[in-house]
Amino acid sequence: MLKDLWIETVERLNQTMPSSGKMWLKNAHFKDEKDNNVILSFSSPFYLDSFKKKCQEQAENVLSDFAGTDIKLTLEVDNNIKEEEIVEKKITKLSEKKKAVNETLNSDYTFDNFIVGENNLFACNVAKVISNNPGTSFNPCLIYGGVGLGKTHLIQAIGNYIYDHNPKMKVIYVTAETFTNELIQAISNKTANAKFKTKYRTADVLLIDDIHFIADKISTQEEIFHTFNELTERNKQIVFTCDRPLTELTGINERLITRFRKGANVDLQPPQYETRMAIALKKCKDLNFKISQEVLEYICLNIKTNIRDLEGALTTLYSFSELVGKEITKEIAMEHIKNFIPTQMIKSTEVTIDQIISQTASYFNVSTFDIRGKSRNKNVSLARHISMYLSSTMTNLSLTEIGKYFDSKDHTTVSYAINKIKSIEESDESIKRATETIISNLKK
C-alpha cells in the first residue's frame, strides 16, 4: 500500500516543487516498506544527502497526508542502481495520462460534494442516471428551482461525471446568456455563424443553464429549437435548468416548451433543517471554521430559503472572526447576518390563509377570487405570490397545504412564488413595504 502512496506522493511533489527539488526527487527509488516506514535507495551518498536536505521533510509531510498517519522515510545507498533510472515507470505513465481540463465546466461541482436531502433527492438521482447513461434516459431533462438551490452545481456535476468517465465525449456547459451573446456575435458573419452551429450541434452532451433568460429572444429560441432537434435525433443528451416550472414560463415559443416537456422535469426545493445543517457543517469544514453548535442551530433555523444565503452567512461570520480574532457568539451572529434573514415573522395559529389573502387583496385592490384563481394580470399575480409567501412564513402549513388554497397550484408553484418574493423584496422597496404593511394589518 505504501508503495502506491509513494507513487502518488512523487506525482504531487512533481506538480508543486521547483525544478531544483525535482532533480533530487527523481533519484529516489522505492525499495521496501516496513511498519510506518518507506525505504528509499539512492545510487550515491551525494544524491542521498541532497534529497535529505532538499526534499525529505516535504515528502514525509505529503506521504503522511495521503496515508492519514505519520510515515517516515528511511534513506540508504544502493550501488546497483543506475543514476539515469526514473523513480518509477508508473509515475511517468500517470503523468502522461493527465488529460486536458474541460474549460466549460467548473471541476468543483461534483456529485461527491453535493449535499443530498429530501428536497433534492429525486433530482440528484435523475442526474446520476443521466450521467451513467447519457442520451438514453431522461432526455431531455429540465431541472428547475429557486435561486441558490443548487441547479448550477447539479447540471455541472452531470457534465463533470460524464467527462471524467468518457473523456472522448464532447461535453459543453453554457449559460443561456452566453449562448445568446455568442449567437449575436455570429449572426453577422457567415463563417462565425457556421462555426457556432457546428460547436453546439455536434455536442454529445449539451448543458444549458438558466433557460428562462431566453424569454422573448426569438432568434435565440429558434437556434435552440434547431439545436435541440439535431441533438435529440442523434440521441445526444440535453439538460436545461430554469428558475421556475414550465407552467410559469412566459415569452417562450410553445413548440420549444413542448420539447422541454418530452423528457424529465425535476425540481429542487429549499433544503430542510437537517440538510441545511449538513451543508453548514461541510462549509465550516472547508473554511476550517470553528463555530459553536448554538450558533449553527441559530443560522440553520433562520436561513431557510436557499443554500447560497446559508453559505454566504457562514462566509460573512468566518471573515469577521478572522479579521477581529473573535469567536462567533450568537449575539455576533444575530448582528452580522441579519441581512440574510427575512423580516422576523412569528408564526401563529391565529393567522389563517383566508385572512392573509383577504388583507393582500385589500392592499392591491383586487378580489380574493382572482388571487385564488388563474388570472395572469400582473397585479393579481404579484398579490397571489405575496399571499403564498406570507402563508409560508406566518402559518405552520406545508407548501402542499398552501397550494390547495389556490386554484391548481402545487407545491412547486408555491415554492417558486416564495423564492421570487424573497429575492425581489430585498431590492424592491415597494414589495418590502407591501409585505410589511400587510403583516402589520394582520397583527392588528
Image: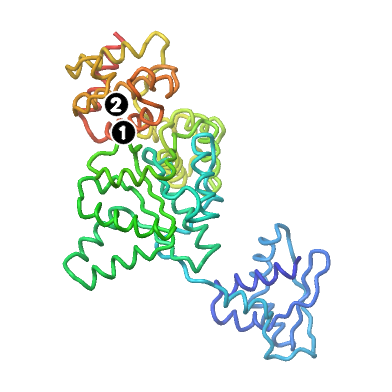
Q: If you read the primary sequence from the N terminus, does the residue marked by circle 2 or circle 1 appear first?
A: 2
Q: Quadrant of residue 198?
A: bottom left
| Separation (CA) of disc 2 from disc 1 | 8 Å
Q: Nearer the viewer, residue 93 or 137?
A: 137
Kindly indicate the quadrant of the structure image that contains residue 340.
top left
* Element carrying mark 2: helix
Residue 261 in picture, x, y percent from top left: 37, 42
Q: Closest to the observer: 115 or 415?
A: 415
Above or below, 238 against 397 in this view is below
Q: Amino acid at mark 1?
A: Lys
Quadrant showing the N terminus: bottom right
The number of callouts visible is: 2
Q: Residue tagged by mark 1? A: 420
Q: Among all residues in the image, which is located at the extreme right?
A: 34
View extreme (front): residue: 233
Q: Is residue 258 above or below residue 133?
A: above
